[in-house]
Structure formats: structure tokens, C-alpha cells
Image: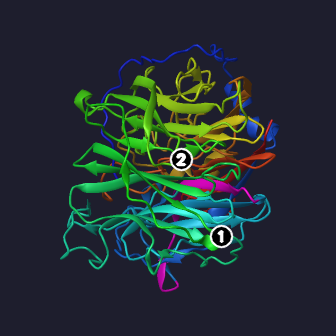
Amino acid sequence: MKRLRLLTAALPVALIGAFSIPVSGAGPVGTQHDAAYAGGATAHGVTNAFVTAQKTSCYTPEVPYFTSNGPNDGYTGMSPCGGASLVKDHSESDIRVDPTNPKHLIGTVKWFVSAEGYNHLLGFFESFDGGASWPVQGHIPGYEGWGDNTDPIGAFDGFGNFYLLNLPYQFYYNSDGTHNFQINQNKEPNPSVPPEVISVAVRPHGSSTATQWISTHEGHPDFVAPYDSKGLEPDKQWVAIDTNPSSPFYNRIYALWAVFSGCCTAQTFVSYAQAHAGGTHSDWSTPLRLPDGSNNPQGVSYVLPHVDPDGVVYTPLTNTAPEKGYCCDKITMIKSLDGGVSWNVTSVVADNIAAPPARYPNTTFRDGIETTFTVGRQKVNGRYPLYVAYEDYGTGFGNVMLVASYDGGASWSTPVVVNDNASPADEFQPNLAAAASGTISVNFYDRRLPCPAQGGAEAAGAGLALDQVNPRYSGSLPPYGAANYCINASIQFFRANLQRVGHNIRISQHSFDPQLNAPHTSCATCVGTFIGDYFGNDFNSSMSFSTFVSTFDDGSNPNHYQQQVVATVAIP
């Protein structure tokens, strides 16, 4: 995602909704000592694979950028790679399990050749043995003519074809190194293509090489919606596919996205098509504007569609409040009973949620998607449950809240605090997934553990000695032992009725420093950096799979680049 949301100080939280459904485990959560959390990865048999460090990747950027911010934070600028440029950093990821083969997984991620210039395409990594190895990796072809491709998100259809919903966009660099997204055919790097598009690339079932993708439809690029007009900016696209053979809309693909008019006012849209065997599909429907349940202008809007096994499509809409200075968020649930043809507002999930700051304290990376949603796969009292998790900053620290609906979204349970840290720290970017058994999981980034102490192997592996200049941190640098600074990834399991299964599990085997090699979203000398706006979470029949960023050197990452880790843990 290419825009930095603007938020001011958080307000106290006030949640609304009908809390008539009894929910087990809805009371206060018991905390977990840091020592128990730190050893959780070992105790629960968590595995980590630094998948993007396993192969050398390169591509030729449409708009090169040669500035280096090094040696601080390990930056080295853009580097040659066999006549192209080396892909160094990999942040913002998604992971999906093939419904036709539980050992087949595809992860997608942003590929950066220039962290300083925020210059990237989308790449993928693929496993055929349940995540034990990742032999096929490459960039996702078809849209190289745009300056950046962004926001990796994919879904498998019922045939085992993998659909990536992409956002290619053009930009050029101003003289001061900032990005310019204005439409100007004298300055655009490739004026023969639209400035921005919502588009699709399909990896057909049975593909075995990195280049086997379909990015055309009926002889032209597979555009869901092109945008040629200044002032209409698509962003935050998401995809879902109905993979239940008994559904009346089996193999229908749903593409949703937001369109911004001006800085921060958004409208959301849906288009759908029918998936066919071999990786082809019907024409995309004319984009339909979605209802938002509000008469007020909406700010940043996240659309997160999921389909229940009966074919009902749901998505929450998470909106900020421009008229309130982006202080607080509102989550509205909408649904379609007729395969995306029409939509209705179901309920307000939560309102006046205290929004997190644009950047968390001590570090320069920006906040990401604050809401996540999934649909349960086992009925509870005759209905498929709905689950929404979201960030809340009402305590002055990020916390992850979870609610459920057991009546199709008409009412919502009392919020549950997902994170169980004993001392206040920021917990953020939740992502929900649902297993076939009915168990659900919430994964999230976690800052409860202090950075490693000076002199140990963990501090050396974390590369903390490289972190010597940070305008957002008032303590001493390098940040040995710094609180609320370094990051881990965590997961929490729940049963369908929100009964908590044990404590948070640390799914990163090592803490990492988010300052190292972090892409700069605006310009090389600008403060704001990026670790991704979300990361992946999915299940097969027995295992949970998560993807997240890490700059730790496990022996494969000596330059402390942003790499993608795939973590596995058995479903409890």
C-alpha cells in the first residue's frame, strides 16, 4: 500500500453491539511471563524457514534509484545482479494453502531492489511438501511496465489455480527523491499503460516453473479495473474465492478494493468473475460500489472479503473519521446473498475504536492494516460464525481485540483481548485464519520482549550494532535491551466459541530489529519506513502457517535484509 494514513492521538475506546451470545473465555485474559513466552517457540515445536534468503532474485526496475543510506541500519543502495538489480528486502506477505492439495502452499511478498527508493515488484515462493522446502521462487510476471506492483494477496480456486490480485501503479521521482504519483505523460516512465490498475495474474494448477503465470484475458491484460483519471486512486485490494462445491456460487472470484478521491476519502467497490479449469475465467463484472453504512465521508477503508460454505460473502469495512482528525475507527459488516450482485449493511461491529498512531513509538515503521476477518468452517448453533480482530490503542499501547458473531453478523460478542503480555507493549497487525476443525487463530506482531542484550549471540544475529541513528528513539544506540522496540511474531488459538487455547505462542525463533534495511515509503531521507501492512496466516489439515518479516541472521541473512520467514506450528 502506497499511502501513509494520518492519525492523531488516540481517544478512549467505546464498543457497541448486541452482546446476547454467550461466549466462553470472554473475560479478562491471564497474562504470560516474558520468560515463558520467550521459550514458547521451542516448547510448541515451532519451525522457522527464511524462505526468501534461499535463492538469489533480481529484476530490472522500471524506475531505478541509486541513493544509499548506508552504513547505518545496513543500507547498501541498489546493487547489480546479472544485468539487473538484486532483490534485497521482502516485506508485506500473504500465504495460501491449496484446497485441492494440503501440501501445496504459495506465499507472495513485495520484492524491493531499492529500500531507499521504495522500489518493488511482487514475488512468490512455493512449496509442494507442506512447507518443508520452497524450491520455486520468482517475480510475478505480466506487469513489469509499471513502476511498482504492490499489496500481495491471493486465493486458490476449486481447481487448484492460484489468483493474485495486484495493484500496479506508475510513479516518478521528484528532484528531491520523493515519489510523484500525479498523472503526467511527459514524466511517467511508461505512458503507454494506464497509471494505475486493479489486475490479476493466475498461476495454473500444476505449474512447476517460476514463469508459469497467466496475466492476460481474451488477448489483453487481465484488468479488473483500470484508472486513468487524476484524483481516483485505487488501493487496498483483496480477493476471495468460493471453493465449496455445494455452494450455488462455487468458483466465483470476488475482487474488492478502495478508491480514494483526494487524500483520504474512500469508496469501496467489488467485481466478480467465474473461475474455469486451466487458470482462465469469465469477464469481470462492472465494478459495483459497496454500501458503507454511513453518511459521513470515510477515510482509509479496508475490505477483507471471505465466503462462508453456504456461499454468503461477507466483508468488514474499516473506516477512519476524517471529521474527527482520524482519531478513531469504525468497523461495519456488509454481506451479499446473491454472489456479489447486491450487498447490504448487516451491522456495526465496533465504533470509536482508538486508532493507533501513524508510527509506533521508538521506531520509524508505519502502522498497517488494523482489522482482520475470517469465517468459521464449522457451524455453531446452525450458523457459520464470523470473527473480527482489530487493533485498539485506548491504553496508549497497541492491543489486539477479538469479537465473534453467531447469527450472521447481526450481533457481536463481548471483546476479548488476544495478547497476553504481562507488561504494556505494542501488539499490532492481527491476521485471522480458520481451520477446517473450527479452530481459529490470530497472528500478530509483538514487542513485549526487550531487544537482546549486548555481547550475546542473539544481539549479533539481530544486527543491533548496525542501528546507530534513529530520530524516533531517545535512548542510547545501538538499542541493546531496548523496550518496545524489537519485534517478534505471535499466534493465539481459539475454539469456535472463543475459548482460548493456552497462551500466546511465539512463532518467531528470534527477535528482529525493524530499523534494519527498512524501505523508506516517501524518500530516502524521510523518517517513515515500512515492514509491511500485514502478514500471512493459513491452515492445512494439521498445521498453521504464518509468514512474517525478519532482519535476523539465522546463518542465511548476513546483510540483515528484510526476509520472509514461514513459521509452522501444529494445530492444538
Dot placed on the residue nearer the N-terminal end, 1 or 2 = 1
Q: Residue at x 67, y 68 (%)?
A: 54
Magenta-span inclusion, residue 86: yes
Residue 6: percent from left, percent from top: 30, 39
178 left or right of 490 in image? left
**Residue nearest the observer in this picture, 374 or 508:** 374
Which residue, given by chain and number where applicable, does mark 1 sit on? 277
The picture quadrant where one finds residue 229 is bottom left
* Secondary structure category for the residue under label 2: loop
Q: Residue at x 54, y 63 (%)?
A: 164
* Secondary structure category for the residue under label 1: helix
Depicted 60 relative to depicted 43: above or below: below
Residue 244: percent from left, percent from top: 69, 50
Which residue, given by chain and number where applicable, does mark 2 sit on? 513
Depicted 389 relative to depicted 352: above or below: below
Can residue 19 be seen at all in this image of the molecule?
yes
Q: Residue at x 62, y 14 (%)?
A: 28
- Total labels drawn: 2
Residue 308: percent from left, percent from top: 62, 41
**Residue nearest the observer in this picture, 324 or 33:** 324
**Residue nearest the observer in this picture, 177 or 388:** 388
Can residue 551 be seen at all in this image of the molecule?
no
Amino acid type of the residue that numbered disc 2 sits on in the rendered structure: Asp
Magenta-span inclusion, residue 125: no
Q: Residue at x 43, y 21 (%)?
A: 394
134 left or right of 351 in image? right
Q: Nearer the viewer, mark 1 or mark 2?
A: 1
